Structures are given as C-alpha cells and as structure tokens.
Amino acid sequence: MERKEFKTTINAPREKVWKVLWGDSTYPKWTAPFGEGSRAETDWKEGSKVHFLSADGGGMVSRIAKNRPNEFMSIEHLGIAKNGVEDTTSEKVKEWKGAMENYSLLDKEGKTMLLVAMDIADEYLDYFVKVWPKAFEKVKELSEK
C-alpha cells in the first residue's frame, strides 16, 4: 500500500469547499467520477460509521477518525459492505483494512488548497491517479458557483 497525495486550488473559501465535500446534495455530484450514483450514509461526526455506497448498494465501511470543520477530515477504512452485510474480517479486507483517507483544506491567498492524502493498494493506484482530477473539477465547479 502506498500513500499518495492529490491536490488542487479552488477559488472559494474553505467553508464553501467543506460544504461541497460533505453536503448531502453535493457529495454524490463530486464523487460521480468514481462511480455514478455514489453516496455516503453518515452524519460525518468524529467516531461515526460511514457507508460509502455505489448505485448497486455495495461499497466500503469506514469510520470518521477526525473531523475539524472547514479544516480536516480523516477517514479510516474498515471493510466492505454488500447487500447490507459488513465484512471487516475476510482475507481480502485485511489487505487494506486501516487505510486512511485524509482531506485538508488550507488557506492560500484567498483561495483554498484541497489536499487529499490516501493509502492506496498498488492495484488501484492508476485508477485514482486518473479519477481524482475529474473529481476535483466537480468540487471546483460546485464550490466556485
């Protein structure tokens, strides 16, 4: 597993970018490049469970490790979910369980730098390198309106 960073600068304040990232109506829009129909079922509170789900209802089970509003969100991935059943113990899950995904929002001369640092299994590295720029474009579009 490799830690990879992705970043972009957005012409909007951190508060607006934060709302776009974690808002009920905007989250599915900016995550669509990862999978049309993506959604998150959570309250985004520190310690809360998150189900990151695709249109077919499958996805990941995670936990909000840290939440400092308008500044930093850290998500720990715990397993997979399929048809309402969580798997946090299979051999496949053990390969990446505990992987972190961190979102930092930094002030940069009136703009916001969004930095995403995530642990990625080698087999998915090319995918994320291709898709994060598309997701960032949606975050920028929604934030800069």
Image (cartoon, grey):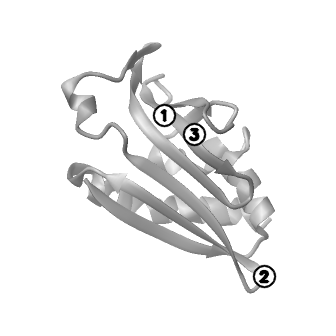
Q: Is residue 46 above or below residue 131?
A: above
The local crowd at label 1, few if under 14, some if 14 to 19, many if 20 or more residues have their Cα within 10 Å, is many
- The residue under label 3 is 64
Q: Which residue, as the protein is rendered here, is positioned at the far bottom?
A: 109
Circle 1 SS class: strand
Instruction: Give me the C-alpha separation between circle 3 and circle 2.
Output: 28 Å
Q: Secondary structure at mark 3?
A: strand
Q: Is residue 118 visible?
A: yes
Residue wearing tag 2: 110
- Where does residue 31 sit, x and y in percent of width and height? 55, 47
* Circles 1 and 3 in contact, beta carbons < 8 Å: yes
Whether residue 38 is visible, yes or no, is no
Determine the CA span between mark 1 and mark 2: 33 Å
Measuring 28% from the left and 30% from the top, which residue is drawn there? 93
* Circle 1: residue type: Ser
Q: Nearer the viewer, residue 8 or 115?
A: 115
Residue 18 figure quarter: bottom right
Q: Which residue is mark 1?
A: 62
Q: Residue at x 32, y 55 (%)?
A: 127
Quadrant for the C terminus in the image? bottom right
* Mark 2: secondary structure: loop
Q: Earlier in the sequence, mark 3 or mark 2?
A: 3
Mark 3 residue crowding within 10 angstroms, few (<14) / some (14–19) / many (20+): many
Residue 67 spot, x, y in % from top left: 66, 48
Of tags 3 and 2, the one toward the viewer is 3
Tell me the amino acid under the disc marked 2: Gly
Reading the chain from its start, which is encountered first: label 1 or label 2?
1
Left or right of 17? Residue 1 is left
Q: Amino acid at mark 3?
A: Ile
* Rendered location of residue 142, percent (x, y): 72, 59
